[in-house]
Image (spheres, grey):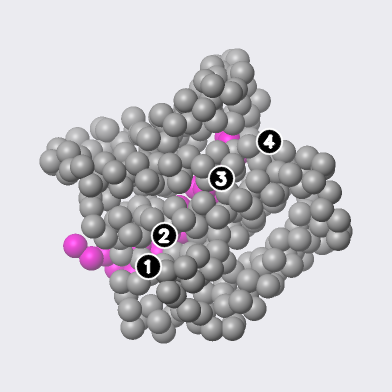
Amino acid sequence: MKSSPLLVNGMLLLVAFLWGVGFVPQRLGMETLDAMAFNAWRFGFGALSLIPVFFFMRLKFSAFKQLNTIMGGLVLGVLLCIAAGLQQISIGMTKLANVAFITGFYVILVPVIGLFVAHRYPIITWVGGFFALIGLALLSGFTGELGLTDVGVQGDLLALVGAVFWALHLLAITYYVARYNQFALAFYQFVFCTLISAGISIGFEVRVIPTDNMGYVWALVNGILVVGIAYTLQVVALKQAKPFVAAVIFSLEAVFGALVGYWFFDEVLGLYGLVGALLMLFGCILSQLPERDKKKAHPHAIV
């Protein structure tokens, strides 16, 4: 059954809000857990939180037994693990506002990646990308030198690489959700992300188990709000939402992330950071505007 555009866009906005607010438990969780360990716990809790929902919705078990659905969930889980892992590591290295805005940069990367699947975009799309790049540089405190030894810049770079995988993850969801059960895909991507994150954590990290009970609390809070609710709504909404509308609304995660960074951790962007943030938002929105007519003509296009 097709939902109204208002309802779908409302879900997208709620996703962006929960993602932005979710940066708080993600930052606090790093006090007791290493990055991949925290992801393993939060995605594990998120997967578990869906089980009673599935029983309440009386979903047919047959939807979860299809091999193609499981394989689709595996692909989504791998992409999610990489993207979320890089984001979580970067949270421990740079400001929440930086991570939030740079993560939102994937909006620009979607049409760029689209070039490799024979999609072409007008010049205004690339102008938007140029503005976003300038904004990213200002937000990250870039002064003309790479400064790769600076921990904050390294965190920004990790978040930027993560943005590439967020873009791939969005495109993959759009592809698979049109073919298989969206709830089964959401569940399997959480399960595989949990397993892969746990394996990496056990092999390379020290704090695999929380050093105090608050680690479980922050992982549970994030697992329910961000994973169980937000990521599941993302999959559900992308079954009907136009990709360019979803991308623009999702970019508001950056605004919410900057606000919670200011409110909870007294992080101030400064004048250059604020200008950079505005340029990134402007570039993200500008790059999507030319796609409006194309999406109406081709409602099933991926990008």
Q: In the rendered image, which quarter is residue 62 located in?
A: top left
Look at the magenta stretch and give its main secondary structure. helix
Q: Position of residue 116 (x, y in %)?
A: 47, 68
Disc 3: CA contacts within 10 A as few (<14), some (14-19) or many (>=20): many
Measuring 57% from the left and 34% from the top, which residue is drawn there?
25
What amino acid is at disc 3?
A: Val
- Report if the CB atoms under discs 3 and 4 are less than 8 Å apart: no
Q: CA distance from mark 3 to mark 4?
A: 16 Å
In depth, the one of 205 and 292 nearer the eye is 205
- What's the magenta region? 1-26
- Report if the CB atoms under discs 2 and 4 are less than 8 Å apart: no
Q: Earlier in the sequence, mark 2 or mark 3?
A: 3
Q: Which residue is mark 1?
A: 302
Q: Is residue 208 above or below residue 84?
A: above
Disc 1: CA contacts within 10 A as few (<14), some (14-19) or many (>=20): many
Q: Position of residue 54 (x, y in %)?
A: 23, 38
What amino acid is at disc 2?
A: Leu
Measuring 61% from the left and 18% from the top, which residue is drawn there?
206
Q: Which residue is mark 2?
A: 171
Select label 3 or label 4 by which is in front.
Answer: 4
Q: Is residue 205 visible?
A: yes
- Report if the CB atoms under discs 1 and 3 are less than 8 Å apart: no
Disc 4: CA contacts within 10 A as few (<14), some (14-19) or many (>=20): many
Q: Is residue 268 above or below residue 296?
A: above
Q: Is residue 238 visible?
A: no
Q: CA distance from mark 1 to mark 2?
A: 6 Å
Secondary element under disc 4, as helix, strand or loop, is: loop
Q: Is residue 23 above or below residue 175?
A: above
Q: CA distance from mark 1 to mark 3?
A: 28 Å
- Report if the CB atoms under discs 1 and 2 are less than 8 Å apart: yes
What amino acid is at disc 4?
A: Gly
